[in-house]
Image (cartoon, rainbow, N blue to C red):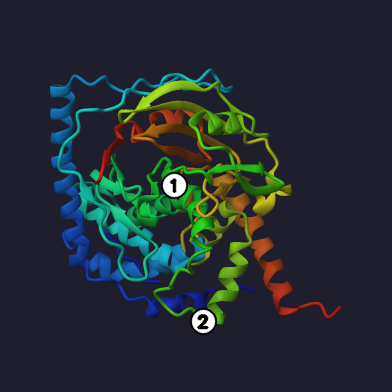
Amino acid sequence: MADWEKLRELTYQVAPPDLASLARTARRRQRRARAFGVLAALVLVGGGIGVAAVGDTDRDTLQPAEDPTPTITDTPEDALPLPGRPPGADQVSVDAGRYRIPLSDTLAFEVDLPDETSAHDDGLFLATEDFVVKTEVAGDAYGVPRHPCTDQTIDPAGPTVDDLVQAISNLPLYQTTPPEPVVLGGAEGMYVEARIPRSYDASKCEGDAVQLPGNRETAVSGPPPYIGRWWILDVEGQRVVVQQNCWGCRPDQFDRAPQTPQSITFTPTS
Amino acid sequence: MTDVVMDGGREVDDLNALYAASYRRLVVQMYAICGDLADAEDAVQEAFITAIRKRRTLRSVNNPEAWIRTVALRRLHRGWRHLAVVRRHQALDREPEPAVEVGPEHVALVTALSLLDPSQREVVVLHHLADLSVAEIAEDLGVPIGTVKSRLSRGRERLGELLTEREEPSHG
């Protein structure tokens, strides 16, 4: 029989942090949320930015890729660095605001993050309530899995944007939209939407999960259903891939989510 | 279990008391549901931060602890959907550091719970560890009472099997 009392005894070992420290975090978030709301409103009014177009929320099947929501080009200047990770922590919680995240020695990106975002691996993964954004330089080693289910070894796709787009479009299992030219954060590239339907049985896959394209050392896999929006960009001569990933989402949930990737801008750092 | 009882008309003006009374047990409840003590602490702390930010809402609810539990549960659900995928990668690099040393006597039950269907596990833990009635669980999770009963019944049965298997290992 289950001994719930033993589990209850664990209660005595839990050490609550000082409530005042949580209150400070709450106050800081409140201030940031207010300030960010005002700033965003000013940008929207002053910059004449189009409001994000929400897609058809009842889509059951893949439609041709639409030009994603307009890129926000007139951005606030006070982008912050991500807060430092506390010792031993594998992630850091981020308040609402605009952040600058290094991509390489010469390139960074800025992005608006909603409240209660967590940043992993120094911003490689930005997990919001609705999705995970993954942004990385896609050098020559960046590639696609030999087979997303049965052989998840990543093979390089070739050095150009077109090489990678072609490799992604040819991936088995993924339902992908026809690639569309796109501009994100001032960088030109191609946009593709990809899905693995809920009905796909991943139990025969490595780790019961389907592999995504990526760099070998940072590639992730996940269980169906999967919806992804991928921007494959040429940023100042460097190929950069932005993935907006959601496992377990319905398309309408994804469409209603904050337009985080569309707020991305790229900035040289040297 | 000591419940923080709040009368409907009485304002919750002492969050400190609620925090002192409920933080630890909420963490253990979340731990039993998610199987990771650090995640459980994160979820409960985030729920209290939300409570501080939404004090007006908190004042209007009959059972503030239940409200905070629901917020923490939502946090866990969200975590399951996304962060497990991120951690699939991160696990290659580093093991999470538990905030509290968890002994084998606790691990056995939590391990068995982790093998249950998540929706059954949640209901079993809320009923047996949080001492919630079937009706309270149905209200908190927003599902019909019949669904809670069925999940509870199946979850208990499966948990019993798992714990029995553990106590009586085969000697083949």
A149 vs B102, left or right, is right
Given residues A121 and B23, the one toward you in this image is A121
Residue A166 appears at what percent x and percent y?
Answer: 58, 29
The residue sitting at 30% across, 70% down in the picture is: B21
Give the vertical position of A124 relative to B125 (above or below). Answer: above
Asked which secondary structure carries label 2, the reply is loop
The quadrant where residue A43 appears: top left
Q: For residue A153, which numbered disc appears in the image?
A: none
Amino acid at the residue labelled 1:
Glu
Residue A24 appears at what percent x and percent y?
Answer: 17, 60
Give the vertical position of A21 relative to A152 (above or below). Answer: below
Residue contact at pointers 1 and 2, CB within 8 angstroms: no
Q: From where the camera sits, is residue B130 visible? A: no
A16 vs B156, left or right, is left
Q: From the image, tell me which residue sits under label 1.
A: B139
Q: Reading the chain from its start, which is encountered first: label 1 or label 2?
A: 2
Quadrant into which the N terminus of chain A falls: bottom right
| Chain containing the residue with disc 2 | B
Given residues A31 and A98, the one toward you in this image is A98
A25 vs A192, left or right, is left
| Chain containing the residue with disc 1 | B
Q: CA distance from mark 1 to mark 2?
A: 33 Å
Residue A40 appears at what percent x and percent y?
Answer: 18, 32
Q: From the image, tell me which residue sits under label 2.
A: B103
Q: From where the camera sits, is residue A129 visible? A: yes
The residue sitting at 35% across, 51% down in the picture is: A123
The residue sitting at 17% across, 39% down in the picture is: A36
